[in-house]
């Protein structure tokens, strides 16, 4: 093919030369031909790509098709239910609810109700009118040592940092939280002016890098922490132990996203890749972790303190529960993140093959806390691919008191699942720091969309709950949710995840 390219290029140039001898305007053909020949020559001499070197010009088509493949598949090939990470059916319902458009479903379910893994809840022959139920359920977070408890919505914005997301995306999420009356988790990138402009309630997440409350050497700074924890918008503080998308790895901020503004907020060097440490430096044992939580609560003047983790080694969480008993120090809430959680950047092995899925992790945490007599003082938040009212319902059945959504909130902003979060080329201006892309995101419009998505999803949850004859979220139990485990066998969550009695392990 290399020889053929050289021969064809030579003959083409000769033909153009002969044509120009008789008709000078023939030279205009070079405008089209010459760039192709120069590209081929470049392919011949580059040594990085064997395919392009062996197939000049033609070889580049492979890379073009490789880039177009996910887009072609998403728009023209995938069905309503087989797309990943989030299929078209669920993307559509988020878009519709965010826009306030018609979100009813025609002609029956698209799901195979006889496939293994199908889940549902049974309705009651005496359903409740959802208009008689609390339209905005909330849960009060704050244990015995908390002096400033917070009434949290049951559906909130999950942790996404400024840096991973653009300034306009943060503004829209926080404005939506303020308008809809729910909380916005800052992610581990700390609190930016964009988190504060609209006055939405914040859950300040502190990761292993201690961004926003770190000393020059990367250790925790009590002084900087106390200053930010005192902000009126900060309602709760969440210590990030691990996250579902990459547990045991630490966060990643690509260098191209680390702008001067973001570097100043985080306290790091500008335009460098920022890798959070895999673990915390402020403690090394469960007992020390409880003492650190106590310190965080005291410095925050009694605001609710919790921690977030993806369950890995079960014995380690049991050790945390024993440490709570021994020290008498308990978090006000625990966020359980599932291994199916999303992120802008993670190694494939971590995304696919490490960390316990949300439902299994949540059931384990709830049961372990109950077994050690700790559950009544600790609220559970669940995070991991939560997009609809039923997604929330089944997590409440497993013990959740409230839920987070990250990708759902991103979709409500206009995310098209382009899978460019890690590249700084997000076409919707959400997961990028490129000003020309960010400018296309209209903040006032997206504020309304985020608030509508939240309100419509909570409304669907309340309607669903009423259909089952349940009056409040804390009455949802494991026997209310069913799963097909084989073609001819059905089990309830109560059978799959047998409940532990309160105080059983004490």
Image (cartoon, rainbow, N blue to C red):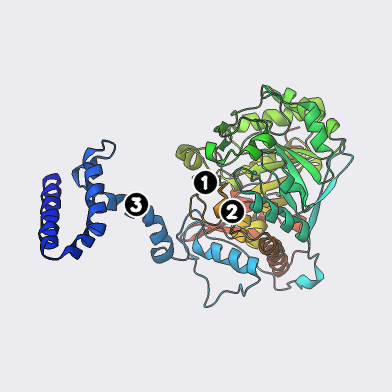
Residue 240 visible somewhere in the drawing? no
**Residue 93 location (% of width, % of height):** 58, 66
Q: Quadrant of the C terminus?
A: top right
**Residue 104 location (% of width, % of height):** 60, 74
Q: Are marks 1 and 3 in contact (CB under 8 Å)?
A: no
Write the residue at 26% across / 35% down: 47
Compared to residue 304, the image places residue 288 above or below, namely: above
Write the residue at 15% across / 49% down: 5
Q: Is residue 94 left or right of 7 when viewed as pictured? A: right
Neighbours of disc 3 within 10 Å: few (<14), some (14-19), many (20+) = few
Number of the front mark, 1 or 2: 2
Residue 124 visible somewhere in the drawing? yes
The earlier-in-sequence mark between 2 and 3 is 3
Say which residue label 3 marks.
66
Compared to residue 118, the image places residue 212 above or below, namely: above
Disc 1/disc 2 C-alpha distance (Å): 11 Å
Number of the front mark, 1 or 3: 1
Compared to residue 18, the image places residue 293 above or below, namely: above
Q: Is residue 264 left or right of 75 when viewed as pictured? A: right
- Tag 3 secondary structure: helix
Say which residue label 1 marks.
424
Disc 1/disc 3 C-alpha distance (Å): 19 Å
The earlier-in-sequence mark between 1 and 3 is 3
The earlier-in-sequence mark between 1 and 2 is 1
Neighbours of disc 1 within 10 Å: few (<14), some (14-19), many (20+) = many
- Tag 1 secondary structure: loop
Say which residue label 2 marks.
438
Number of the front mark, 2 or 3: 2
Instruction: Determine the residue located farthest toward the right in the rendered image.
Output: 147
Identify the image quadrant of residue 329: top right
């Amino acid at each position: 093919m290399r020889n053929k390219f050289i021969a064809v290029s030579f003959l083409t140039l000769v033909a153009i030369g002969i044509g120009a001898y008789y008709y000078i305007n023939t030279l205009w053909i070079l405008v089209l031909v010459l760039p192709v020949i120069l590209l081929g020559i470049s392919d011949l001499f580059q040594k990085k790509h064997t395919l392009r070197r062996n197939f000049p010009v033609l070889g580049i088509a492979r890379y073009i098709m490789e880039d177009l493949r996910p887009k072609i598949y998403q728009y023209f090939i995938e069905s309503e239910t087989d797309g990943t990470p989030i299929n078209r059916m669920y993307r559509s319902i988020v878009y519709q609810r965010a826009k306030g458009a018609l979100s009813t479903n025609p002609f029956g379910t698209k799901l195979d109700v006889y496939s293994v893994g199908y889940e549902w809840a049974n309705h009651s022959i005496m359903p409740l009118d959802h208009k008689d139920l609390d339209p905005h359920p909330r849960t009060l977070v704050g244990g015995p040592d908390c002096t400033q408890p917070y009434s949290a919505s049951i559906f909130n914005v999950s942790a996404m940092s400024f840096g991973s997301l653009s300034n306009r995306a943060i503004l829209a999420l926080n404005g939506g939280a303020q308008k809809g009356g729910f909380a916005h988790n800052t992610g581990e990138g700390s609190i930016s002016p964009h988190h504060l402009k609209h006055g939405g309630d914040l859950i300040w997440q502190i990761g292993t890098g201690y961004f926003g409350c770190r000393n020059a050497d990367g250790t925790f700074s009590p002084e900087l922490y106390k200053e930010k924890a005192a902000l009126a918008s900060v309602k709760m503080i969440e210590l990030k132990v691990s996250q579902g998308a990459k547990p045991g790895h630490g966060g990643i901020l690509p260098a191209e996203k680390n702008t001067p503004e973001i570097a100043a907020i985080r306290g790091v060097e500008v335009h460098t890749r920022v890798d959070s440490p895999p673990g915390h430096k402020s403690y090394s044992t469960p007992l020390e972790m409880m003492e650190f939580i106590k310190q965080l609560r005291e410095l925050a003047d009694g605001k609710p303190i919790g921690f977030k983790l993806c369950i890995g080694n079960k014995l380690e969480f049991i050790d945390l529960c024993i440490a709570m008993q021994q020290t008498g120090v308990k978090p006000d809430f625990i966020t359980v993140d599932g291994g199916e959680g999303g992120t802008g950047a993670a190694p494939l092995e971590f995304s696919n093959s490490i960390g316990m899925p949300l439902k299994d992790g949540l059931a384990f945490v709830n049961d372990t806390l109950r077994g050690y007599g700790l559950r009544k003082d600790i609220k559970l938040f669940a995070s991991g691919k939560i997009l609809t009212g039923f997604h929330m319902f089944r997590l409440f059945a497993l013990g959740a008191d409230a839920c987070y959504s990250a990708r759902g909130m991103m979709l409500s902003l206009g995310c098209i699942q382009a899978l460019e979060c890690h590249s700084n080329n997000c076409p919707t201006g959400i997961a990028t720091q490129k000003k020309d892309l960010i400018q296309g995101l209209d903040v006032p419009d997206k504020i309304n969309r985020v608030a509508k998505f939240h309100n419509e999803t909570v409304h669907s949850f309340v309607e669903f709950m009423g259909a089952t004859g349940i009056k409040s979220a804390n009455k949802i139990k494991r026997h209310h949710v069913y799963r097909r485990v084989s073609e001819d066998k059905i089990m309830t969550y109560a059978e799959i995840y047998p409940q532990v009695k309160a105080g059983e392990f004490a």
